[in-house]
Every structure is written in structure tokens, then in C-alpha cells.
Image (spheres, helix red, strand yellow):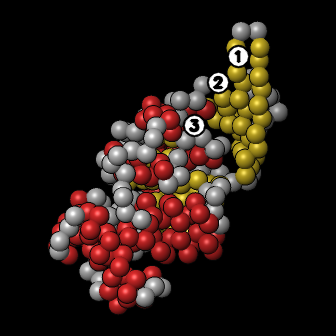
Amino acid sequence: MWVYPDWKKCLPAEELLGSRSLGSSVCAFGRHIRLLLCVVHGNERADAIMTTPMRRIIIIDDHDAIRRGVRQLLESKPYYEVVGEAADGRSGLEVARATRPDIAILDYSIPELNGLDLAHALKREFPRIEILLYTMHDREEIIIEVLRAGVRGFVLKSDAEKHLLAALDALSIRRPYFSGAISDTLLEQFLDSKPHPLASSLTHREREVVQQVAEGRINKEIAQRLSISVKTVETHRASAMRKLKLRTTADLVRYAVRNQLIQA
């Protein structure tokens, strides 16, 4: 590893990129971070220098304490700027539209629009956005679904703070980061595999309707929230129940709770 002597502030790579990064240093210049990667392979040496601007971040979580804790952690770092927050998925999408963030930190179980559908929506509107799922859910089917939605960072809330920072640092240079029960092996298997048999058979709109029903809203209210007709709501609701082999609204609520579309 080489660190150029004219760099003003150099931080160990492990502090910013986690234990996976070897032979690198990060140096800060005001609103920019400069990354030097030096790789030694046989008699060859490759030096790569990257200038990365301050990363704009939004936080979407329905728990005030979580949002506050993450914001305070990031505000202590000169290279991250929290530009918006939201307590539900739909508000989070509006915040993203208003702020155009580089990275979105979001939970899976959030009201209005769950983390999976929000990730789909964010990637549709902002293809280059990086998404970090910060959640307590580590079920395999959830992991697979969010990976398919374009999520490239996954940190459990039970993990130490250093994993959250390491994930953000990795995403800042377009690298994935997974902690806890998530591994690089799982990611590679996912990318090389055919669609997983546990992946949901529901469409995006059907999942939206299921979540709204499970949150206790009637068809007319759901239609207004989703800007569709009551008849369309009924069609999606019936289709979802048929696919899931459910008979009653209570069954639908239990399905939503079991699959973390809502919290019990």
C-alpha cells in the first residue's frame, strides 16, 4: 500500500470499508474523499485513484429512535450528508424525488409501501441510486426478493454500528455489502441462479393492495391512496387471495404479518 505524502488526512481503510478491504487508504479533502487502491500481484502493481463526492443520504424507517440514531451517526462523518427522512414508504419516495439522494437507507417493514416495493420504485425512478436495507429481518426469501429489487447493501439492526458505516462506504464506491446472515456466497448464488421458488408470485400492485388491506383500510380508501378504481382494487385483492389460497381478510392479515409486509 502506498499513501502519497501530500494527502492531508489519511484514514485506515478498515475504518471506512470494513475488514474486507485490503491495501487501501481513504483521504478526505473538504467535501470530497479520495480513494487510493494499490494492488500487488506478482511483479505488477496497479494504482487506482478515485474521487468521490460527499454522499447524500435519506433515511426511511417508521421508528423515530432509529432514524435519529442513524442521522446522529452519519452527522459525525464529514463525507455523508443526511438530506431527508420519512416514516413510511410513500413519503420516502416523495423525499427521494425532492432530494435526489445517492443512497437510501430503509427498513423492510414500513407502512404504506413496504421496503421491497419501495426499493422497486426507487430503482425504477433512480436507476443509479444505491439502497441499503437496515432491518431486523433475515429470512432467506426476504433477502432474495430485495436482491432482485436492486438492493446491494443489507445490514441487520442487531449488528454493530461499524457494519452500517462499512456498508455505506462500500456502496459509495459501487460495491455491495452484506452483514450478519447475508454473505457474498449467497449473493453469488443468487446472481447465478434461476428465479428462486420462494419468490413471491404476487405482482407489485397486488402486494400494495395486500399491505393496504392488512393495515385495515377499506377498498374505497385503498383506491384513493393508489389512484386506481375501487373495481381495480377488488380485482387485485381477489387475485392475490386466489394466488395465496386464502379465503378471508383475517387470512390475508396473517399472511402480511408472517411475510413482514406489516408489523404485528
Query: Can residue 171 be seen by looking at this rendering?
Result: yes
Q: Is residue 226 left or right of residue 97?
A: left
* For residue 252, above or below residue 70: below
Tell me the CA gap for discs 3 and 2: 11 Å
Residues 177 and 23: in front is 177
Q: Amino acid at mark 1?
A: Val
* For residue 225, above or below residue 122: below
Residue in the image at 37% along x and 87% along y: 231
Q: Badge 1 is on which residue?
A: 40
Q: Amino acid at mark 2?
A: Gly
Q: What secondary structure is found at the residue carrying circle 2?
A: loop
Tell me the CA gap for discs 3 and 1: 19 Å
Tag 2 and tag 1, C-beta contact below 8 Å: yes
Residue in the image at 43% along x and 45% along y: 195
Residue in the image at 54% along x and 59% along y: 104
Q: Judge depth for marks 2 and 1 and give the one in front.
A: 1
Residue 17 - label: 3
Residue 203 - label: none
Residue 23 - label: 2
